[in-house]
Amino acid sequence: MKKMWLVGLLVVTLGTSSLKASGKFSGDMIGEYYYVSQNHNDSLVGHNGFWFRRIYFTYDNFPQENVKIRLRLEMGSPGKFNTKSTLNPVVKDAFISFNGDAGKLTFGIQPTPTFAKVEDSWGYRSLEKTPLDLQKWSSSRDFGISFTGRRSILDYKLMIGNSSSNKSECNKGKRVYGALGVTPIDGLYIEFYGDYSGIYSSNKDYIVQGFASYRCSLFRIGMLYAVKGEIGNSQKRNILSGYGVFNTGEKLDVIVRCDRMFEANPEGEAISYIPFAQNSPSTFILVGLSYEIYKNIKIIPNVEYVIYDSSAVSPDMYPRLTLYYKW
């Protein structure tokens, strides 16, 4: 822990001296008050408190034109209702990218194409992760090399990585990712995505996803459908999700989202901040109001609700008051 802070201090010192002319610091903080009013786990009912779900601290440097270096630290509360811990920082991003006429080449710990476009369109990571991220189907980061490009109305990203998120590599396997998007008209975006982990690995799982979104000055809406499976195994998992963000005033958004999980999630109880029952398919609903009280500072009353197909499993309800700010 002490070593990490010393490294961080060194980065800040270098960034504010020889590199400060071409670099910048930024950050995001997601804090909230939560209350567990209903839950499939009776022992959690009545739990309440304040926590930071995420804090990001980012340094971007541009040593030359068309070259970018990023270091981002992330920290957050454990997200478990029976665990206490301090907010320990971890490396979220650490990459260098080169922009050229053909596209952008990036090396290091970086966002995967799994839900980068989905998260950008959803726009409320401050409230909740995108569906595949939330259900732990895939990680938002991987250590690898990628190429991103755009031709006319098409954009694409290809990547190969360790398939170990931002953790160290500990096996022979690699994962390949690919995303192809098209913008046929202003405001409409359609993307097809797939990944496969069977490179030098006996674990040959895959994800395929289709995503479409539309945005204008009054609203943005989106829908995705995704399948996760394994070569040689007929059992699959399916998610269908839709959202809408409606601008009802200069500073006020109405937010709705619904995710349908057609199969029970065997990792459901391990999901931070909102554990899911592992023995039933479920429907996740989020409703909220976002008001920008000052520039880049939003207060967002919201409710997350999970309904289970099995009548033997009680629903989950989490009223929350979220405060999001960035600089």
Image: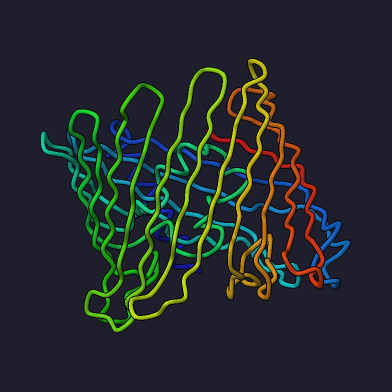
Q: Nearer the viewer, residue 32 or 26?
A: 32
Extreme residue toward the left, this view: 101
Q: Residue at x 29, y 69 (%)?
A: 162
Q: Residue at x 27, y 81 (%)?
A: 201
Q: Residue at x 66, y 16 (%)?
A: 249
Give the image location of residue 56, x and y in percent.
51, 48
Number of marks present in the image shown: 0
Colour scheme used in the picture?
rainbow
Q: Nearer the viewer, residue 143 or 103?
A: 103
Q: Nearer the viewer, residue 140 or 235?
A: 235
Horizontal side of residue 216 vs 112, given as left or right: right
Horizontal side of residue 258 vs 150, given as left or right: right
Residue 131 occupies which quadrant of the picture? bottom right
Q: Is residue 184 above or below residue 239?
A: above
Q: Nearer the viewer, residue 260 or 267?
A: 260
Give the image location of residue 53, x and y in percent.
63, 53
Q: Residue at x 59, y 34 (%)?
A: 244
Q: Is residue 54 above or below residue 212?
A: below
Give the image location of residue 137, x and y in percent.
48, 65
Extreme residue toward the front, this view: 234
Give the image location of residue 311, x and y in percent.
80, 68
Extreme residue toward the right, this view: 46
